[in-house]
Image (spheres, rainbow, N blue to C red):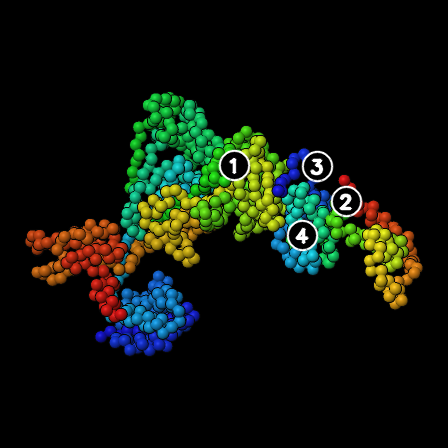
Amino acid sequence: MSRIGVFLCHCGENIAGTVDPGKVVEAANRIPGVVHSIDYKYMCSDPGQSLIREAIKEKGLTGVIVAACSPRMHEPTFRRVCAESGLNAFLCEMANVREHCSWVHEKSELTTAKAIDLVRIMVEKAKRNRPLFPIKVPVTKTALVLGGGIAGIQASLDIANAGHKVILVERDPSIGGHMAQLSETFPTLDCSQCILTPRMVEVAQHPNITLHTYSELESVDGFIGNFKVKIRKKARGIDEKLCTGCGVCAQKCPLKKIPSEFNAAMGMRTAIYTPFPQAVPNKPVIDKKRCTYYLKGKCKACEKACPAEAIRFDQPDEIIEVETGAIVCTTGFEVLSTEFFPEYGYGKYKDVINGLQFERLASASGPTLGAIRRPSDGKEPETVVFIACAGSRDPAKGIEYCSKICCMYTAKHAMLYKHKVHQGTPYVFYMDIRAGGKMYEEFVRRAIEEDGVKYIRGRVSRIYEQDGKLIVKGADTLLGAQPVEIEADLVVLATAMVANSGAEELAKKIHVSYDSYHFLAEAHPKLRPVETNTAGIFLAGACQAPRDIPETVAQASGAASKVAALFSADELSREPVIAVVHRTAPPIFSICEGCFMCEQACPFQAIEREEIKTRDGKLIKVVAKVNPGVCQGCGTCVALCRAKALDLQGFSNEQVYAEVMAV
Amino acid sequence: MLSQARPGSKGRPLADRLREFTGESAAKCYQCGKCSAGCPLAAEMDFPPSQILRMLQLGFPTLEAKAIASLSIWLCLTCETCLARCPQEVDLPKIMEFLREESLREKKFHPQAKEIIAFHRAFLDSVQAAGRLYEIGLIADYKARSRHLFQDVLVAPKLFWRGKLKLFPHLIKDRSNISRIFSKTLGKKEPSG
């Protein structure tokens, strides 16, 4: 006979505000099998937990129902309380009377009645619970980091320094990401390359880090602690072991007018190229879409010039298979290009550029060696207009969010321009100045007060060209929205930070969810910001939402510490909520008929075949078997099994029917 | 339509002159509006104080001209409530004073400011001459300047019988000191070019 205890939480006013706790407790006491029922203001608090502990001991409970919030919130808390009191953790259930009841209904008799129903349902389930024991799975102490920007670099170094192996995969020919493209960084104006490149080198030289650049994720199988990953190492067209990185090939390449990705099309590159001089690894790649040899079958100028004879035109892509225990996704972001803005000329005005392009103009390693020269004629611009919120906070353009970094980098751009062109006038059109961060507001005020940047509050409606000038039409809303017209030589759009174009595809590959903007979703926006809903997969940086460098680095270190914690044990335990195949004594052995429809249906490849043999080795039948390490407990096989030979532990058919019948 | 000063066109931005003569920076103001919110005269002004300051921030000639020709600068009482409350510690009364001087220098004052300027001059003349206020002299001077000859003329007898208007000025002891103060101040303060 079951001895169930019901513990109703008020959750302050969250539950007690609409549900009458007294009535629920009273009704719970009348449910057959319930021997104890009590309510308390905060059941998750220490005194609340003590109520459960004491009741388990004094009343000899065989099952516990905590009627409170979602099991996603506190199930682990209460299961731990039960386990500490000698009750198997899986005999503890939660009735969600907050999200499923008090939060979604008005205060009424019916709301209380629904709460009582929810408790009754869980009592029926709990009566049929059996003790379960966590499944132990081994952990492969190697982490896969996807993306070699500052987030990936930081996460890799932190995990590697904790003594674990790291495989860092970067899509581009070099690590460094967007940060390598930046000139100076706000709010300190320290040179981006100066602080980043030493870390890039550290990654390349770290004994615990294996670096795969110019490589992409092919597929991910497995589960936390035991991922099986395929990486496509794209053919560079060179033998990396022979190449010395001397750069003669790029000098000899006849194609010199290819817009450089690293320079955001502000500079040119060749078909065989190293993205930038400080690239890690400092080995070139051949752009097969543009190289004359790949297009027309002749040229080979680089092959002739290469002193190391390292050019390999026929090099194939290579698929590398690795096993990892955790994955950190740091795939970063893209910025909208100026072509996105019809009102600002669809990108057809050469002197309307985006923020990343301005970074390259201002960078000492950029195409102008740091001199601010406009792209159309190379002249030094006398008047520069910066437009914040270009695309951001613009629901009509499909981007409702604030890109977060633009206010700061626009202030920085205007400041850098003023530092380089003393007699120039920078104007900034903005909607709000969002400068929340250490020394950020001070930085913006410095741009305005010390460097004389003219801020005009209002959105620019249109830009058009007239007599070699860009006419910027806006308004000053601080003066009652008086129209303003600026004749500019250069316009810089602080274009919105958007998710990578391949983000959706990647999310599907690694089985994590994403939001409507294709940013990858964290498990909890406040309390689990670097985890995803897939155990063992972590996030850091701008692949999750717009972020600046300090936040990205902090988050990367956070994700790294989560990985280190995961790797701190040799085994990890998983919830035993998995499917099991019916087994019984001979002569039946199992009611499984061996149709293996479950094998087809299982999305995790957890179904194996088991041969049942006699003692002398004669095959009796082949039945399904669930690999407990791989099964995720989704229940698809259970629903599909014609013989009802499969059942889900903790959510058995019997339990679910009893729950339904209890209503 | 507002637009920037064309390179090479007339003059420097007013904000530069402001900084030179008063040490105050227009750029310091971040347009929170607290000055306008607390100004006792803001409701009477053509532009609230924060907007007057805004007109100096961009360096647009049309806006600067508007500030100089505004009535607001003449309505300002220099009560300094704005300065006392300003989070950025902008000395707005000082800026108002600078704008009044600019307005007079360029002779571009608001038509309704005529009486205020007439009274202002008459008052200072009276003080300069007598070392303190000489009411009949002030009234005569004001009326001559403003040409409002018969304004409030009916209250004059009442004031006279109650002893509020003295026929002759009360002179202070050492008037040379007063004229020294005036010449020193005027000589220094008049902004040039």
Name the residue carrying label 4. Answer: B47
Residue B144: assigned label: none
In the rendered image, residue A18, in percent from the top left (x then y), is placed at 40, 71
Residue B10: assigned label: 3
Distance between the alpha carbons at the discs numbered 2 and 3: 17 Å
Residue name at image x 57 percent, y 43 percent: A474
Distance between the alpha carbons at the discs numbered 3 and 1: 29 Å
N-terminal label among 3 and 4:
3
Distance between the alpha carbons at the discs numbered 2 and 4: 19 Å
Q: Quadrant of the N terminus of chain B?
A: top right
Name the residue carrying label 1. Answer: A352
In the rendered image, residue B9, in percent from the top left (x then y), is placed at 68, 35
- Chain where mark 1 sits: A
Total marks shown come to 4
Residue A444 appears in the rendering: no
Name the residue carrying label 2. Answer: B107
| Dot 3 amino acid type | Lys
